[in-house]
């Protein structure tokens, strides 16, 4: 599975301008929410940092399966 990466950007002159470079030819998808409550990507700088840290953790293999998570949650419930 190809790792997903979240990159922040903005539209300038009907072109998406990213806050960090991506390799040439990178295929991207753009998510735009008409309803701010349904799709709120207006994250604070801290929230973006936490999201990137979580992605890095996943790339390092620091994750648990659904079953492991369920067991951990059941143990504290």
Image: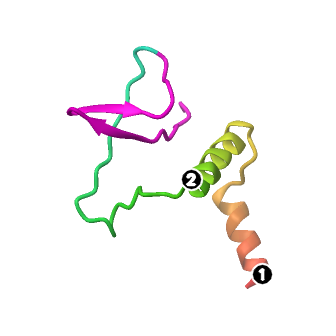
Nearest the viewer among 73 and 33 is: 33
Residue 6 percent coordinates (x, y) = 50, 41
User: Residue at label 2?
Assistant: 45
Q: Quadrant of the N terminus?
A: top right
* Local crowd size for mark 2, using a 10 Å CA cut-off: few (<14), some (14–19), many (≥20): few
- First in sequence, mark 1 or 2: give its number: 2
Gap in Å between the C-alphas at discs 1 and 2?
A: 32 Å
* Local crowd size for mark 1, using a 10 Å CA cut-off: few (<14), some (14–19), many (≥20): few
Q: Residue 9 in magenta?
A: yes
Q: Would you say 14 lies left or right of 67 here? A: left
Q: Would you say 54 lies left or right of 9 here? A: right
Above or below: residue 56 compared with residue 41? above
How many numbered badges does the structure rendering display? 2
User: Residue at label 1?
Assistant: 76
The residue furthest bottom is 77
Magenta span = 1-23
- Label 1 SS: helix
- Circle 1/circle 2 CB separation < 8 Å: no
The residue drawn where x is 29% and y is 38% is 11
Residue 62 percent coordinates (x, y) = 76, 46
The residue furthest right is 75
């Amino acid at each position: 599975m190809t790792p997903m990466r979240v990159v922040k950007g903005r539209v300038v002159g009907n072109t998406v301008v990213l806050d960090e470079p991506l390799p040439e030819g990178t295929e991207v998808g753009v998510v735009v929410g008409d309803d701010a409550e349904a799709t709120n990507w207006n994250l604070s700088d801290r929230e973006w940092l936490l999201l990137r840290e979580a992605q890095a953790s996943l790339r390092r293999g620091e994750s648990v399966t659904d079953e492991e998570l369920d067991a951990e949650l059941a143990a504290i419930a």
